[in-house]
Image (cartoon, rainbow, N blue to C red):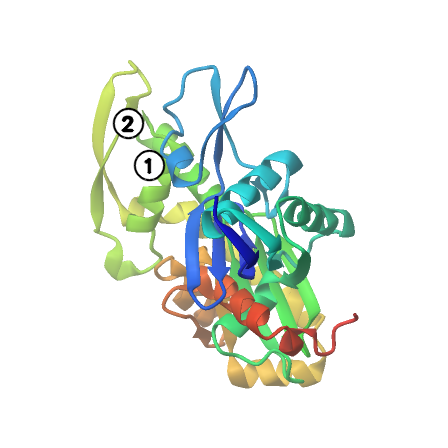
Amino acid sequence: MNFRIMAEDLAIDLGTSCIKVFKKNEGVVISEPSVLVLDHQNKEIKAIGQQAKEMIGKTPDEIIVQRPIEKGVISDFNLTEAMLNYFFQKINPGFSVVQPRVVVCVPSGITDIEQRAVEDASLHAGSRDVIMVDESLAACFGVGLTPEDPRGILTLNLGAGTSEICVISLNGIVASKTLKMGGDDIDKNIQNFLKEKKKIEVGINTAELIKKELLSLRLKDKDIGMEVEGRDVKDAQPKRIKVTSEEIAPCISEFADSLIEMIYLVMEKTPPELSSDIKNDGFLMTGGMANVRGLREYIEKIINLKAKISDKPELDAIKGAGLIMENPDRFLKYQSR
């Protein structure tokens, strides 16, 4: 057994679809699906992370697939604790006299009870101290902005389970709205579209692949296509079809329009001084759904503001949480202790 005096501190982005872990002095060391596979009889955990995700849609009746995080919050405390413990041991194997301090990203709309559940799960999994940070705030740190300054930052955090629109200043949330819709809902929309319009059923992993490869709001991408395999709705036989970007574009229309409606609602609650900052600086798009081609341009055109997007927006929050872990005083400035 490995033995050490002190375990390395960690930062965690506990997302609906993916858990990411940042290790001090090493950066992002884990990015795996937030999925577990259990034996239905004795609740024994058979697989966690990427291995578990690859089993979705392929398990016998006695084996079940579970996602312990739903819409950004813990839905199963014990499974979340088990998943965190698994990744803690993977990063800091063996026994440590002093357990790690952990920075955890949480949604801005989280309740006190939900926040307590995240904190307790982290402590039970083996951390000595937990710092909770809003994931939109962490994303601002992650892309090199200075949210501790008295200047308004409009942030669109587009995740798998939820989408958050908020204005940040002095390390705090000034105004915010949460849309209970994200990348997972788009996957289901694609599944429903294929079933109703193309008469083919596909698994959730296939729908996610279609989203990543084809989904676009750009006219120039409309003829891009890909072969899709699934099950024929009529006779249950294997079926292969071609799907184009233009055909699945409506799967994201409601989501895009709801985002814009939320942006206007948040801006209505924003103080005039901060609105002026946003007018000059534009807004930040972060999270995995910020990768959807054409979504940025669609929003920019309607709200008449320019967007800032990093090369890998899905990693913004975990990188920011890592910076907070390495320099917590910068985050704790203006925070109640």
Which quadrant would residue 325 be assigned to in this image?
Answer: bottom right
- The residue type indicated by label 2 comes to Gly
Q: Residues within 10 Å of mark 1 (few under 14, many from 20)?
A: some
Where does the image place residue 324, in percent across and percent down from the top left? Answer: 58, 70
Q: Residues within 10 Å of mark 2 (few under 14, many from 20)?
A: some
Q: Which quadrant would the C terminus be assigned to in this image?
A: bottom right
Which quadrant would residue 54 be assigned to in this image?
Answer: top left
Mark with earlier residue (1, 2): 1
Where does the image place residue 332, in percent across and percent down from the top left? Answer: 69, 74
Q: Residue at x 66, y 77 (%)?
A: 329
Q: Which residue is mark 1?
A: 206
Where does the image place residue 185, in percent across and percent down from the top left? Answer: 49, 42
Q: Could you tell me if the residues under marks 1 and 2 are in contact, i.e. CB atoms within 8 Å?
A: yes
Q: Residue at x 29, y 59 (%)?
A: 219
Q: Horizontal placement of 1 versus 103: left or right?
A: left
Q: Name the mark on residue 124.
A: none
**Between 39 and 127, the one nearer to me in the picture:** 127
Between the C-alphas of marks 1 and 2, the distance is: 9 Å
**Between 77 and 262, the one nearer to me in the picture:** 77
Residue 97 visible in the shown view: yes
Q: Horizontal placement of 234 versus 162: left or right?
A: left
Residue 325, compared with residue 150, is above or below; it is above
Q: Secondary structure at mark 1?
A: helix
Residue 139, compared with residue 230, is above or below; it is below
Q: Residue at x 60, y 84 (%)?
A: 277
Q: Secondary structure at mark 2?
A: strand
**Between 195 and 165, the one nearer to me in the picture:** 165
Where does the image place residue 229, in percent across and percent down from the top left? Answer: 24, 30
Residue 263 visible in the shown view: no
Q: Name the mark on residue 230.
A: 2
- The residue type indicated by label 1 comes to Thr
Q: Horizontal placement of 44 versus 205: left or right?
A: right
